[in-house]
Amino acid sequence: MSLPKTGYVRLSQILGNPKANPPIPAIIPVSKSTWWAGVKSGRYPAPVRHLGPRITAWRAEDIRAFIESPSNNHHGE
């Protein structure tokens, strides 16, 4: 899956979902627990929660900036 230039992405789009049909490849290959620990510590971008009461998503621009940042060459560390 390619990351959209703008808009929002869900966690399954970021971390991938091999059980989806068709499977969704990971943009950032870490586990959910690693992702949420990184969000809490500030390593990974914070989600946007104003989309709905049970919707958690991330701005595509924030994920793209994180990926392109030179300090983030090793996503899983």
Image (tube, rainbow, N blue to C red):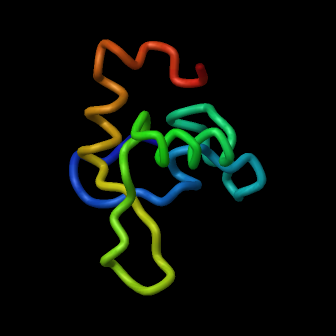
In this rendering, position of residue 62 left or right of residue 1:
left
36 up-or-down from 30: above or below? below
Residue at 50% x, 35% y is: 27
Q: Nearer the viewer, residue 59 or 13?
A: 59
Q: Nearer the viewer, residue 46 or 4?
A: 46
Residue 9 picture quarter: bottom left
Residue at 39% x, 84% y is: 52
Residue at 39% x, 58% y is: 47
Locate the C terminus and report the quarter of the image it occupies.
top right
Q: Position of residue 49 (x, y in %)?
A: 37, 72
42 up-or-down from 4: above or below? above
58 up-or-down from 15: above or below? below
Q: Position of residue 46 (x, y in %)?
A: 37, 52
In this rendering, position of residue 21 left or right of residue 48:
right
Q: Nearer the viewer, residue 54 or 40?
A: 40
Q: Position of residue 37 (x, y in %)?
A: 58, 43
Residue 69 picture quarter: top left
Residue lying at the far bottom in this picture: please name it. 53
Q: Position of residue 4 (x, y in %)?
A: 30, 48
9 up-or-down from 34: above or below? below
Residue 20 picture quarter: bottom right
Q: How many marks are shown on the rendered structure?
A: 0
Residue lying at the far right in this picture: please name it. 19
